Each structure stands twice: as structure tokens, then as C-alpha cells.
Amino acid sequence: MIGADGKQVGVIPIQQALALAQQSGMDLIEVAPNATPPVCRVTDFGKYKYEQEKREREARKHQHANKLKEIKFGLNIDQHDYQTKLTHIEEFLREGMKVKVSLQFRGRQNAHPEFGKQLMDRVIADCAEFGRAEVMPKLIGRSIHMMLGPAKGVAKQHQSHEQEPDNTE
């Protein structure tokens, strides 16, 4: 049992632990039920529950590695549009996100899937310094899909640059 002051009381019977909790006007909470013997703590249950929810929210906030962004290309994309989409891909990869790149064929474009493959290879080559292809381009129906992931160390470098203070005066 852990007392209200945070100090370890020791192994005591449950009736005695309940009595100690009632004396201090708090609740007896089982913290680790699978331990032998089970660990209990004397604390305010509302406060304990609030702190637990706060920890879970904080853990969810830092859990963005599994986010996925999608960028869609057209087969006859203009150079400027291509560069803009490439810039977005770079930003997402530097933030540590995965990027799904899609290319949809329309009408007569279905007759030339090799042009789509060339465009996807061009995207892979242009993203080589900050990302890598996790799933190579695949033709599925009327579209080509591939998955890009951040290159090793790129996302970490980006995070360390964000945390550095700006000393320009």
C-alpha cells in the first residue's frame, strides 16, 4: 500500500487499508492489480482519474507517427503544379508523416499506363533526399498508388530545428 503522502506503508490487510483511507477522508484505489501482492494507493479518486485522463491525452497528442496524408496527381500535370505538390510531400515527410501518392487515369489516359509509371518514378527520384518509397507504385484499376515514408533521420532533424531558439536580433 502507498499512503496519502506518497510514501510506502507496506503490505497490510485490506480491512486495515480501507480503515486508513477512511481516516484520511480519501479513497483506496487499486493501482496494480496484477502485482503480487496487489498495489493500492490512498488518494482522492476524482483527482486520480483526472490525472490518468490527462496522461492519456498527452500520450495521444504525441502519437502522430501513424498519420497518413494523400497527394493526388493527374497524368498531364503542369510543372508548377508538380513542384507545389512535391513541396507539400516534402513538408509532410519532414514532419514524420507517411504520404500516399495517387494518380487517377481518365478517359483515353487508360491506354498509356506507362506514362503514369514514369510520373511516379519521377516523384520517387525527386523525393529521394527526404523520403523513400515504402510501397512501390502499383496499378490498381484506373489508378496508380504508392506509399512514401520519411527517410531515416529526416524527421528527427526537422524536429530538432523546430526546438532551437531563434537568436536573430
Image (cartoon, grey):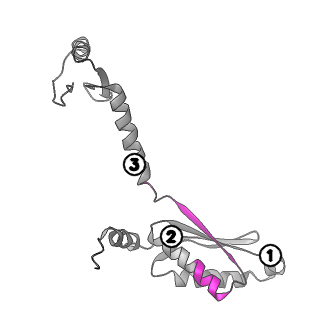
| Residue labelled with disc 2 | 92
Viewer-closest of 161 and 117: 161
**Three-letter residue code for mark 1:** Arg
**Contact (Cβ within 8 Å) of mark 3 with mark 1:** no
Work out which quarter of the rendered image holds the C terminus and state it.
bottom left
Question: In which quarter of the view is residue 57 placed?
Answer: top left
Q: Residue at x 21, y 12 (%)?
A: 16
Is residue 153 toward the left or the right of residue 105 in the image?
left
Q: Position of residue 34 (x, y in %)?
A: 32, 29
Is residue 107 toward the left or the right of residue 66 in the image?
right
Which residues make up the magenta segment?
A: 63-85
Q: Secondary structure at mark 2?
A: helix
Q: Position of residue 150 (x, y in %)?
A: 46, 71
Q: Answer few, some or many: residues within 10 Å of disc 2's Cα (few below 14, many 20 plus, some between 14 and 19).
A: many
Work out which quarter of the rendered image holds the N terminus and state it.
top left
Residue 106 badge: 1
**Three-letter residue code for mark 3:** Ala
Tell me: residue 3, above or below residue 74: above
Distance, label 2 to label 1, CA atoms, is: 27 Å
Query: Of the residues tagged 2 and 1, which is closer to the observer?
Result: 2
Q: Position of residue 9 (x, y in %)?
A: 15, 24
Q: Secondary structure at mark 1?
A: loop
Tell me: residue 64, above or below residue 96: above
Question: In which quarter of the view is residue 30 placed?
Answer: top left
Residue 59 badge: 3
**Three-letter residue code for mark 2:** Phe
Q: Residue at x 73, y 84 (%)?
A: 76
